[in-house]
Image: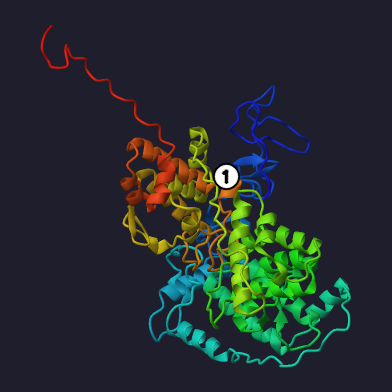
């Protein structure tokens, strides 16, 4: 659709008379006028619009429905040159001529009649009798709505659909090869040659992955662009393979963005097809390797034993459960400077460490000292159980308690601005935390089934939602249904990355763009409640699911009530003087 011409500068109702050469007035407002507008140069209509054309012929006129120029059916638009679907087909198959029934000059079929007369004859056709077009059109034709008769219905349509389904080829089966050709050295690929090879090569592995892609995309509601981008990335991966038909490493898939492909969707399809080998290095492994490279070999082997047991656990006595990678990361953060200090002093093995060495290298009281103490206890416990050290020098050290912070309230204007955010997801997330003091991980893990009849269920707690939260929830659900109508993600909060998948959003969604941390919002809500209840710790525990120790952290900042003055009596004994 073309850009409509500007409106008249005088009346601001009609369009300008001409745009080339530019005229800023319509014919009614031209200086020295009004002047009569000319007829349309295409159809001769007197309904002048602009540039010598009427509102029906001008490409920038408003898109109003009209009648088909071939069969006079109502409901076509200028975008299709005022023709319905069937008449557009007739334009390419039948010549112009004069209809034998109605006398109009239009497209005429093999029987000498136009589409309108043929449809009228078919409508009045009697069973088991031929169509008499002259008799059927003797008293005129009955007009109809456009593009309704072109929809196939009935048994024949069902039969044709079942025939197409039977004609589809059987699903491709593929088994990856069990061997892999090792590479002597890696060279950067020629992108032009790689893309040409990817476009011209069609392997059994790609056909198998393409079938998995179509099924996966249909279930998860992927867009056509995402399907095409993933198919192109799969072709690039088969062209990059050094061993055709082998499983694909995840580290190779991560190189696709530099070649114009997409990594996340491709990795998802390869995993669904069972052709992905996850060889990625986790963040905690990279962090550990960066802090043990400079250590002596014996000490590095001992620390590596502790690292493996912490992440994978141990089934041998003494048994240990696997720890969270973030816990291991914090322990490395506290112990890495101590390891390096011992190595700089010439210590080769942790078996040489004494209690004085541990006490000397511990940092000042604070968070890092707590991490170091906890990590050293676990480190020497594991090494002693495996007979790599003789004693545990960290045993019996007094534990240092972490510095307890004092919760502070937020600025009310900041909370109000976040609550009234234009983004429905941001407004709902802020409302859930600001009214009901949910944590960031709880908001991240909320499912659609957790909210029912205006109540939110989190574990054993059932929370009646506030009115403002319900309003923002309804607005967000409408936005979610409009933006991702075919998503099967069970989580409440989804975004552009998780909409076509089933995983949860990241920890920074939607807090990064708001500039407000969920923990600060939660602390502000609990502080407001602790002040409103006068320090009722029991009520805070029941309302927000806190422990007594956690609730006391907020109660310690509460100012003590002012002492009430005792009324003065005339004498201690009550006797008058």
In this image, 152 relative to 53: left or right?
A: left
Residue 138: percent from left, percent from top: 44, 68
Left or right, 77 with reference to 351: left
Name the image quarter holding residue 233: bottom right
Relative horizontal placement of residue 11, taking residue 564 as reference (left or right): right
Q: Residue furthest top?
A: 577
Is residue 221 found left or right of 541 in the rendered image? Answer: right
Task: Looking at the picture, tell me which residue is in the foreground, 437 or 393.
Answer: 393
* Residue at 66% over, 28% down: 9
| One can see residue 135 in this view | no
Where in the figure is residue 235, as x and y percent of width and height?
74, 78
In this view, 239 is above or below 19: below
Q: Is residue 184 above or below residue 416?
A: below
- Who's the residue at 51% across and 66% down the image? 487
Label 1 packing within 10 angstroms: few (<14), some (14-19), many (20+): some
Residue 108: give x, y in percent of width and height: 60, 71
> Is residue 362 positioned above or below 28 on the image?
below
Tag 1 residue = 514
| Residue 535 location (% of width, % of height) | 35, 39
Q: How is the image coloured?
A: rainbow
From the viewer's side, name the closer residue of 24 and 178.
Answer: 178
**Is 575 or 24 nearer to us in this picture?**
575
Q: Can see residue 574?
A: yes
The quadrant the C terminus occupies is top left
Which residue is most to the left? 575
How many numbered discs, if any? 1
SS for tag 1?
A: helix
């Amino acid at each position: 659709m073309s850009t409509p011409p500007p409106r008249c500068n005088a009346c601001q109702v009609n369009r300008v008379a001409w745009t080339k050469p530019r005229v800023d007035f319509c014919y009614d407002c031209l200086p020295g006028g009004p002047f009569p507008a000319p007829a349309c140069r295409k159809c001769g209509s007197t309904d002048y619009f602009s540039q010598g054309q009427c509102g029906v012929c001008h490409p920038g006129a408003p898109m109003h429905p009209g009648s088909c120029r071939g069969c006079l059916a109502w409901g076509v638009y200028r975008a299709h040159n005022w023709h319905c679907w069937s008449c557009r087909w007739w334009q390419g198959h039948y010549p112009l001529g004069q209809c034998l029934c109605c006398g109009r000059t239009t497209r005429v079929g093999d029987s000498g009649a136009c589409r309108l007369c043929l449809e009228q004859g078919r409508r009045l056709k009697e069973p088991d009798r031929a169509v008499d077009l002259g008799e059927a059109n003797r008293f005129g034709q009955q007009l109809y709505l456009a593009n309704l008769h072109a929809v196939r219905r009935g048994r024949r349509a069902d039969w044709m659909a079942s025939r197409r389904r039977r004609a589809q080829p059987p699903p491709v089966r593929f088994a990856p090869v069990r061997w892999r050709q090792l590479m002597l050295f890696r060279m950067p690929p020629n992108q032009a040659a790689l893309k040409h090879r990817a476009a011209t090569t069609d392997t059994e592995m790609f056909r198998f992955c393409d079938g998995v892609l179509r099924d996966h995309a249909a279930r998860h509601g992927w867009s056509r662009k995402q399907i095409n981008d993933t198919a192109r990335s799969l072709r690039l991966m088969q062209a990059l393979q050094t061993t055709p038909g082998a499983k694909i490493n995840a580290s190779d898939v991560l190189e696709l963005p530099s070649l114009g492909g997409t990594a996340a969707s491709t990795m998802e399809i390869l995993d669904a097809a069972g052709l992905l080998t996850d060889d990625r290095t986790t963040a905690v492994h990279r962090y550990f390797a960066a802090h043990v490279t400079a250590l002596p070999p014996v000490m590095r082997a001992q620390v590596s034993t502790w690292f493996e047991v912490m992440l994978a656990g141990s089934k041998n006595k003494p048994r240990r459960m696997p720890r969270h990678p973030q816990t291991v990361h914090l322990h490395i953060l506290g112990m890495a400077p101590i390891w390096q200090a011992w190595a700089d002093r010439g210590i080769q093995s942790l078996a040489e460490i004494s209690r004085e060495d541990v006490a000397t290298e511990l940092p000042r009281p604070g968070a890092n000292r707590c991490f170091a103490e906890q990590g050293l206890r676990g480190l020497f416990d594991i090494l002693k159980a495996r007979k790599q050290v003789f004693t545990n020098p960290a045993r019996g050290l007094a534990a240092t308690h972490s510095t307890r912070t004092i919760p502070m309230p937020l600025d009310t204007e900041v909370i109000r601005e976040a609550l009234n955010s234009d983004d429905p997801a941001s407004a709902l997330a802020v409302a859930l935390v600001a009214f009901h003091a949910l944590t960031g991980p709880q908001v991240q893990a909320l499912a659609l089934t957790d909210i029912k009849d205006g109540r939110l269920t989190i574990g054993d707690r059932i929370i009646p939602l506030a009115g403002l939260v319900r309003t923002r929830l309804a607005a967000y659900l409408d936005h979610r249904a409009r933006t991702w109508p075919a998503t099967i993600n069970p989580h409440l909060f989804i975004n552009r990355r998780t909409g076509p998948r089933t995983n949860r959003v990241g920890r920074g969604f939607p807090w990064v763009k708001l500039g407000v941390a969920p923990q600060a919002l939660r602390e502000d809500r609990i502080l407001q409640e602790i002040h409103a209840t006068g320090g009722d710790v029991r009520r805070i525990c029941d309302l927000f699911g806190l422990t007594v120790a956690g609730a006391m952290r907020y109660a310690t900042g509460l100012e003590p009530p002012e002492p009430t003055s005792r009324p003065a009596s005339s004498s201690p004994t009550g006797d008058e003087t």
